[in-house]
Image (cartoon, rainbow, N blue to C red):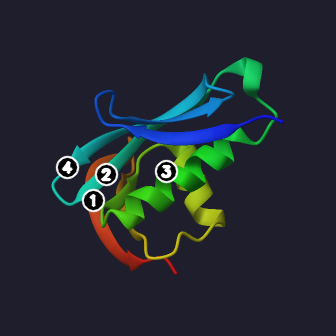
Amino acid sequence: MTDITVTRNDDESRYEIRSDDVLAGFAEFDLRPGSIRFIHTEVDPAFQGQGLAGKLASAALTDAAGRGEAIVPLCPYIAKYLETHEIAGAEIRWPRASPSHGASTGEEPTGRAE
């Protein structure tokens, strides 16, 4: 049976997902006072098709919410995940969209997901 683990690696500024102790993917973040900006999510092609990106997103977002960090989804995968999944107690700060450049780095508080 495959052992899947997700851990937060503050030294590398990312959450890491491992399959049987082998790094399978990560979700990079940028910590700010009171918030965590998810900026990039990646799963190694050798591990794709196993649902690891969703497991990584769920665990990372749940952990961040548990730490009281407001979540800023700059990564398209994390943003899409949040549109279709609820994270109990999470405060989501959706980035403000810029007409010519997509999402900006500004934050706009929109409340808590339930």
Question: Mark 2, residues whose alpha carbon is within 10 Å: few (<14), some, or many (≥20)?
Answer: many
Residue 105 placement, left or right of 64? left
* Kind of residue indicated by mark 4: Arg
Relative vertical location of residue 81 with respect to residue 93 in this rendering, above or below:
above
Please give the name of the residue rendered at 29% of the width and 66% of the height, measured from the top-left corner: 108
Neighbor class of circle 4 (other Cα within 10 Å; few <14, some 14-19, many 20+) is few
Q: Which residue is drawn at 27% across and 59% down?
A: 107
Mark 4 or mark 1: name the one nearer the start of the chain. Answer: 4
Rendering coords of residue 11 (x, y %): 28, 29
Quarter-wise, where is residue 29 in the image? Answer: top left
| Dot 2 amino acid type | Ile
| Residue at mark 3 to residue at mark 2: CA–CA distance | 11 Å
The amino acid at mark 3 is Ala
N-terminal of the pair, mark 3 or mark 4, is 4
Q: Residues within 10 Å of mark 1 (few under 14, many from 20)?
A: some
Q: Are marks 4 and 2 in contact (CB under 8 Å)?
A: yes
Of badges 3 and 2, the one in the foreground is 3
Cα gap from disc 3 to disc 4, whole angstroms: 16 Å
Q: Name the residue under label 1.
A: 107
Please report whichever mark, 3 or 1, sits nearer to the chain's N-terminal start.
3
Q: Residue 32 carries which label?
A: 4
- How much space separates mark 2 and mark 1, taking CA atoms? 11 Å
Task: Determine contact: label 4, label 1, CB under 8 Å.
Answer: no
* Residue under numbered circle 3: 60
Q: Distance between the residues labelled 4 and 1?
A: 11 Å
Q: Which amino acid does label 1 sit on?
A: Glu
Q: Which of 101 and 4 is in front in this view?
A: 4
- Circle on res. 28: none
- Which sits in the foreground, 15 or 95? 15
Instruction: Name the mark nearer the viewer: 3 or 1.
Output: 3
